[in-house]
Amino acid sequence: MGDSDDLFDIYRKDQGKAALTGPELAAALADTVRRSLALIEELCAEVTRALAQARYSTRLAQSVTDRSSYVRLDRRSEGFRDYLRTWSQQRADRVGGGMHWEAQILVTDHRRTTKEIGIGIAFEWPGAGAGGGEGAGDGGLAFVEFWPTGTGVSLPADARGFQRALVACIIKLEQAGELASVKERG
């Protein structure tokens, strides 16, 4: 262990950093939601490429639901952008509020059968992640739970875990006979 004065100095520096407030906090919250959803989209696309031989496609559904108000929105719409702006401003003003959302990942097999995999997303408070509280981009963006298996992963830190959890859900759907891989037919 290092010199105790060094540890106190590090602690003071960490405590002295200005926490985000007001419009900056609202912007960081909205950015966390947007970046998390974009990352989930990217990870789904990577899983689709990895499962090309089995002829599965995966994608994040367009609609998302805010669990605090049960409002369902098309995440690519202007209404979503407006809602997200209001949502993040309310949380910044109150320094709290529900940060849990729901979404679905759509999985389509070679027969064009599509099944939904429900996920819960708990967005991280900017600066509260594993990065030591320095700002919105340092630590986690979100914690994602896959409902069919109960597996939870932190993004972006466990992106590979996200992909494994998604594949585990697909395998569970295969075992239930709801989806079929081309590879199964030989």
Image (spheres, rainbow, N blue to C red):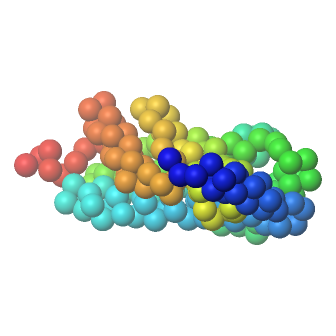
Number of labels in the image equals: 0
Kindly identify the residue that appears in the image at 87 percent across and 60 percent down.
21
Kindly identify the residue that appears in the image at 74 percent across and 64 percent down.
28
Q: Position of residue 85 (x, y in %)?
A: 82, 63
Q: As drawn, is 138 to the left or to the right of 18?
A: left
Q: Nearer the viewer, residue 48 or 30?
A: 30
Q: Is residue 83 visible?
A: no
- Furthest toward the left, the residue is 186
Q: Position of residue 25 (x, y in %)?
A: 81, 61
Q: Is residue 105 visible?
A: yes
Kindly identify the residue that appears in the image at 86 percent across and 48 percent down.
95
Q: Position of residue 124 (x, y in %)?
A: 66, 50
Indicate whether 55 appears above or below 166.
below
Kindly identify the residue that appears in the image at 30 percent across and 55 percent down.
56
Q: Nearer the viewer, residue 19 or 26?
A: 19
Q: Position of residue 102 (x, y in %)?
A: 62, 44
Indicate whether 183 appears above or below 173.
below
Q: Quadrant of residue 36?
A: bottom right
Q: Nearer the viewer, residue 149 or 161?
A: 161
Q: As drawn, is 160 to the left or to the right of 6?
A: left
